[in-house]
Amino acid sequence: MSWTDSSVVVVGTVAFDSIKTPFGERARIVGGAGTYIGWSASRLGVGTGLVSVIGEDFQQSELDLMSQAGMALEGIDRPVGGKSFFWAGSYHMDMNGRDTLETELNVLADFNPEIPAAWRGAKYLMLGNIDPNLQASVLDQMTERPELVVLDTMNFWMDIAMEPLKAVIARVDVLTINDEEARQLSGERSLIKAARAILAMGPRYLVIKKGEHGALLFHEEGGKLQYFFCPALPLEDVVDPTGAGDTFAGGFIAHVARTGSTDFETLKQGIVVGSALASFTCEAFGTEGIRAVTREALDARIAEFRRMMDWNGAGVEA
């Protein structure tokens, strides 16, 4: 898959995870936001240019698989003698809560993303969850304004870098955060009030992720707040939710890129596509689930979403 106008530049981690859930455990498997986003986009036939950093311990065989799936890797730095970012965590029985057991920044501690010259005119940019000052530096490197910039962040940056975070939020099109982060960022308890406050900070769209309870998309037009809700697909077996949010983000921006439209209706579709892809990630450890997704399996799962959400109001009186 060669670099095209529909390709997405992704800035995010490529790393190792050790994961323990009530259904098993895996040691030092490949993870990281950039990895999940890249694999997710590839399931839609959309190529990504990954901007990240890895250590000498990252296997070439894994890089080869990523390349074959449509991920361009010229933006990945590999310092001599460094070790890859590593995270270890253990999930609670309900699979909603988790405990971080170990975090090793390693080469990520000195990560300063540099966009390859050939990618600086990209139409689609996904800024993964990193220091907002670094996110801003990536935007500064683009030679022209992308048609869609999606930014992911978390409460950690709200705690220690709120002002730089607000500054970069004002420069993007879509902000993706979870419900607790939306409340912290806005200072509002109600998600409707939170959405209005955050959209007033500058982004055109806001995605609020609610884990197993789905996702909300907000947009304000003509002074009126528009919103769309997509539930998460009920799954018989949730094995490992690690990376589900990043898989969602990858499917979301890849759908926009392949359609070439950034209107509210297209983004609504992207929410459903991203949710469908994320459901596969939850059914296996690490990237095992998303790697195995075929177009036929994805189409079938999107059809499940359509059936689940279909309601014509027949027989209901106001």
Image (tube, rainbow, N blue to C red):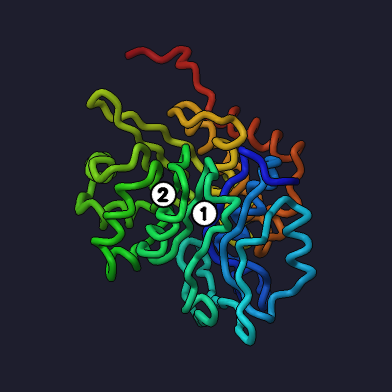
Q: Residue at x 42, y 51 (%)?
A: 151
Q: Residue at x 52, y 63 (%)?
A: 114
| Residue closest to the eye, 196 or 145 | 145
Q: Quadrant of residue 50?
A: bottom right
| Residue closest to the eye, 176 or 214 | 176
| Residue closest to the eye, 160 or 1 | 1
Residue 245: give its label.
1
Residue 147, visible in the rendered structure:
yes
**300 left or right of 166 in image:** right
Q: Residue at x 70, y 45 (%)?
A: 43
Do the numbered discs 2 and 1 sit on residues whose CB atoms are within 8 Å? yes
- Name the kind of residue labelled 2 in the image: Thr
Local SS, label 1? helix
For label 2, count other residues whose C-alpha is less than 10 Å away and answer few (under 14), some (14-19) or many (20+).
many
Q: Residue at x 51, y 54 (%)?
A: 245
- Outermost residue to the bottom: 81
Residue 48, placed above or below residue 74? above
Residue 16, visible in the rendered structure:
no
Residue 176: give its label.
2
Residue 31: % across, % down: 62, 66
| Residue closest to the eye, 21 or 68 | 68
- Name the kind of residue labelled 1 in the image: Gly
Residue 86: % across, % down: 57, 77
